[in-house]
Image (cartoon, rainbow, N blue to C red):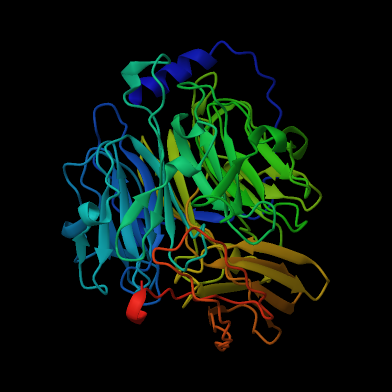
């Protein structure tokens, strides 16, 4: 990892790059304030080579309503901070259980894999990963071996999502390369795609993903419904420095073949860009009702605008977010100023010609272009920055950032726009039940304001780089007020709310439709065992289907 990054620096120093950037006027409000020390976060101790911090994750492990923070340290130990609810954090009493002092960790992510209402913790390592089950906020238990997801690779980022709609979240782990000393002649390590068996274990189903790009030196993947068809597809960002196969987009085509059908459509969709990809952000930056992709690179970044017809086009240069002068890493979409347009934050490892450029915070101008706030963002964080994760940790309605920096450790940036702006906002926490996973991953929320503007967000878990954002969906409304909220739950059920108060955080719990029992008798299949056959039924209402099979003497199988 270390030598590979240094080689990247050497490769790009001599590259001629036209630096084009637009910086906002210094008279604009400064949105972020560094509150690291005041909040009680201690950066990891210094190390000789300076390469320390990588990824971080937000999650309310004790379910007290306040987001806690887990940060990784490549030299160990990692740290779990508990949110005190007053703008400060303190090392959790449970920290020793998840510190992993001997691990070389690269990232982390919370997810409720067993639907018990308590977020569990996956820590990604160079070597076996570690998976902790949350014991109702009272402790953590290592269930890695039982779950069967340890691996022994160089894992960078994980993503959770329910690809088959069974109500339990599945897992994709992006693995980079065996060793930075291997060089280009060695393939990247194979990624791992796990199906949740709903009994605390997982099955490796990586073979469901065709095209060979799961061995492309993956840095980050995300479950995302890019084609608006109601199921979660997968987008993977690969590092061509190790294996130049390009990025991968797998379309979820459902259970219409043996096991499950995914189709690799990367080239056809224009999403197979070959770059030294490292970070990924997904969001509807142009408010046109579909999700776009932004990913980083050692040089010009890429913004893939979803055309709405199954294809993407790179608009990074025209949008002003190409940032060719930087070696980019983690990235995240967020509406930092609550004006109703998704802005973009990018972590920069270094300049392509050396130096430490400021991390850009790109303000969305609402016309397809962005303006870089540069140093005036208050979260420029010069130095070698890696992961970034967004969350409203103090629940004031303005999205904050935590950033990992090789040279300075972790920084927590509090959004101070609430004292400078009267813009309205709405935050929703979705909770699933039954055939909707507890985290409601894959749920889609469309908010329409009093000006007729519609914004789309999807509940997702896993992107940026080695990091886990909060799971809430947050909408800025500007000067408008709320017209209605439409939630499309992962099972297809649609819920419309038109009476929610603005400038508040609401918890919305999925309410399944009443079960309708409709007997559909079938002829007895004889003899036993029966030959393979197809059974067809016509359903008159949409909803979950429970199929029970019985053997002889009515023994359920």
Residue sticking out furthest to the front? 527
Q: Is residue 490 left or right of residue 306?
A: left
Task: Name the foreground residue: 383 vs 290.
Answer: 290
Against 88, residue 276 (above or below) is above
* Residue 168 percent across, percent down from the top left: 43, 65
Give left or right: position of 405 versus 357.
left
Is residue 541 visible to us here? yes
Name which quarter of the figure residue 170 lies in.
bottom left
- 445 with respect to 57 (left or right): right
Q: What residue sits 58% from the left and 71% below the top? A: 491
Query: Residue 503 or 57: which is nearer the viewer?
Result: 57
**Residue occupying image coordinates x 35% and y 76%:** 552
24 with respect to 402 (left or right): right
Seen in the picture, residue 256 relative to 505 is either above or below; the reply is: above
Locate residue 397: give its quadrant: bottom right
Query: Residue sitting at 65 percent across and 69 percent down?
Result: 445
| Quarter of the figure with the N terminus | top left
Seen from the viewer's position, the closer of residues 463 and 245 is 245
Tell me if residue 455 comes above or below residue 352 in the rendering.
below
Query: Which quadrant is home to the C terminus?
Result: bottom left
- The image position of residue 142, as x and y in percent, is 20, 57
User: Horizontal and vertical percent for residue 62?
Assistant: 31, 73
Query: Is 206 in front, or is 258?
Result: 258
Residue 479 in view (yes/no): no
């Amino acid at each position: 990892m270390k030598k590979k990054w240094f080689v990247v620096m050497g490769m790009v120093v001599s590259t001629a790059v036209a630096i084009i950037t637009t910086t906002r006027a210094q008279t604009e409000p400064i949105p972020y304030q560094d509150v690291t020390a005041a909040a009680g976060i201690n950066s990891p101790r210094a190390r000789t080579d300076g390469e320390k911090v990588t990824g971080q994750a937000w999650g309310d492990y004790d379910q007290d309503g306040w987001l806690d923070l887990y940060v990784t340290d490549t030299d160990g130990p990692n740290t779990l901070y508990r949110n005190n609810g007053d703008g400060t954090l303190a090392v959790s009493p449970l920290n020793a259980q998840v510190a992993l002092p001997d691990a070389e960790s690269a990232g982390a992510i919370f997810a409720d894999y067993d639907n018990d209402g308590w977020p569990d913790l996956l820590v990604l390592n160079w070597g076996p990963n570690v998976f902790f089950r949350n014991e109702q906020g009272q402790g953590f238990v290592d269930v890695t071996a039982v779950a069967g997801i340890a691996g022994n690779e160089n894992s960078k980022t994980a993503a959770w999502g329910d690809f088959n709609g069974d109500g339990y979240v599945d897992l994709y782990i992006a693995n980079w390369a065996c060793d930075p000393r291997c060089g280009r002649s060695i393939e990247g390590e194979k990624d791992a795609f796990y199906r949740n068996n709903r009994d605390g274990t997982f099955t490796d189903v990586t073979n469901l993903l065709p095209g060979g790009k799961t061995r492309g030196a993956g840095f980050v993947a995300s479950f995302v419904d890019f084609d608006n068809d109601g199921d979660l597809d997968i987008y993977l960002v690969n590092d061509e420095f190790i294996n130049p196969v390009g990025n991968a987009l797998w379309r979820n085509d459902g259970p219409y073949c043996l096991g499950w059908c995914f189709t690799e459509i990367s080239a056809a969709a224009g999403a197979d860009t070959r770059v030294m990809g490292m970070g990924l952000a997904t969001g509807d930056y142009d408010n046109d009702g579909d999700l776009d992709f932004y990913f980083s690179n050692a040089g010009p970044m890429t913004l893939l605008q979803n055309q709405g017809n199954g294809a993407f086009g790179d608009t990074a240069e025209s949008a002003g977010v190409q940032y060719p002068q930087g070696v980019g890493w983690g990235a995240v979409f967020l509406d930092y100023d609550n004006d109703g347009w998704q802005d973009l934050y990018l972590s920069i490892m270094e300049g392509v010609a050396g130096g430490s450029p400021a991390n850009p915070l790109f303000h969305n101008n609402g016309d397809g272009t962005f303006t870089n706030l540069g140093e005036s963002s208050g979260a420029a964080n010069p130095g070698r920055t890696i992961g970034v994760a967004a969350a409203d940790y103090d629940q004031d309605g303005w999205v904050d950032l935590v950033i990992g920096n090789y040279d300075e450790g972790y920084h927590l940036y509090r959004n101070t726009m609430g004292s400078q702006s009267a813009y309205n906002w709405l935050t929703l926490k979705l909770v699933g039940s039954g055939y909707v996973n507890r985290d409601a991953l894959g749920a889609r929320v469309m908010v329409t304001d009093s000006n007729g503007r519609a914004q789309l967000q999807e509940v997702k878990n896993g992107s940026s780089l080695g990091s886990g954002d909060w799971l809430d969906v947050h909408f800025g409304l500007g000067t408008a007020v709320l017209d209605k909220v439409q939630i499309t739950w992962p099972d297809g059920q649609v819920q419309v709310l038109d009476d929610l108060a603005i400038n508040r955080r609401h918890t919305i719990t999925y309410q399944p439709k009443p079960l309708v029992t409709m007997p559909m008798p079938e002829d007895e299949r004889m003899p036993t065992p029966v030959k393979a056959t197809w059974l067809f039924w016509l359903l008159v209402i949409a909803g979950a289907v429970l199929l029970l099979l019985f053997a002889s003497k009515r023994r359920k199988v």
